[in-house]
Each structure stands twice: as structure tokens, then as C-alpha cells.
Amino acid sequence: MISPKPGDKEKPRFERSEYYPMGKGKYHLVWELDKTNKSEVRVFDSNGIMTQVIPDKSGWDYKHELDVENLSENQDYKILISAKDPNGNEAITFLKIPAVSD
């Protein structure tokens, strides 16, 4: 069981965050932090409107992977990854997925 560490106010640091195309409108995300964490992914379209919220179901871990689906190929997206350690210290990073050009 993961429990908070008394006095820990240091937020986790992203050591890796990237994506891989998996087909039409589908991407595989991979990220890793220096502290165990639970994560959530939010997808924003080119207008800044949040279109998806995807909780990572892997639980407490250092490395996370998940798939984002149903993205339009003719639109840019910004992927926000939020990670919180057991003390609630939060780290955030962004990935940009460009529109597919013809």
C-alpha cells in the first residue's frame, strides 16, 4: 500500500513523455516520473476545449501508458498529463499532437 510521506512537498518530475501514432485518430502515450504517482490525461482541441478526460487505471506507479482515441486527423491537439504523488504534489506536462497533413 502506498501512503504519504510526512513533510514531502516536492512535486514529481517527468523524466519521459511521448506519444506514438497507432492508426487513424489513435495515439499511444507513455510517460515516466521520478516518484510513484497516479495520473490523468486531458485532451484539448485546437480551440482549447477539453474533449476528453482519461484517468490512468494503472494506479500507483512510475511508468504509465494509455491510448487516446477518437481524435480528428484535421485538428491539432494538446495533451495535458497530470501526475500526483501520494502527498498530492502535482506535476503537469503537455504533449502537442499536430493535425495530419495531406
Image (cartoon, grey):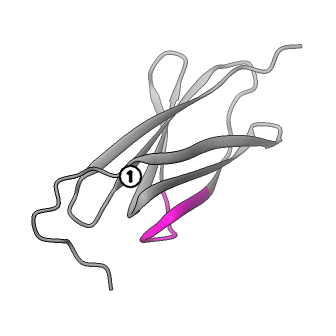
In this view, the residue in front, 12 or 99, is: 12
Task: State the extent of the magenta-drawn residues as a range.
Answer: 55-65
* Of residues 67 and 71, the one drawn nearer to the viewer in this rendering: 67
Please check the rendered image and state whether residue 59 is part of the magenta-colored stretch, yes or no: yes
Q: Quadrant of the N terminus?
A: bottom left
18 vs 35, nearest the viewer: 35
| Residue positioned 68% across, 34% down in the render | 71
Figure check: 41 above or below 61: above
Amino acid beneath label 1? Ala
Q: Based on the displayed image, in which of its 4 quarters is residue 66 positioned?
A: bottom right
Q: Which residue sits at x=68%, y=45%?
A: 69
Give the image location of residue 86, x and y in percent. 26, 67
The crowding category of the residue bearing disc 1, from other C-alpha atoms within 10 Å (few below 14, some 14 to 19, many at least 20), is many
Residue holding disc 1? 83
Q: Residue 94: image x %, image y %?
A: 49, 32
Q: Secondary structure at mark 1?
A: strand
Check the image and name the residue furthest to the left.
7
Front residue of 63 and 98: 63
- Whole-percent x and y of residue 2? 31, 79
Looking at the image, which residue is at 63% across and 20% down?
76
Q: Is residue 64 above or below residue 60?
A: above
Query: Which quarter of the rendering shows the C terminus?
Result: top right
Is 7 within the magenta?
no
Identify the residue at image location x=53%, y=54%. Answer: 32
**Furthest-right residue in view?**
102
Left or right of 72 on screen, residue 90: left
- Relative image position of residue 60 (x, y in whole percent): 42, 71
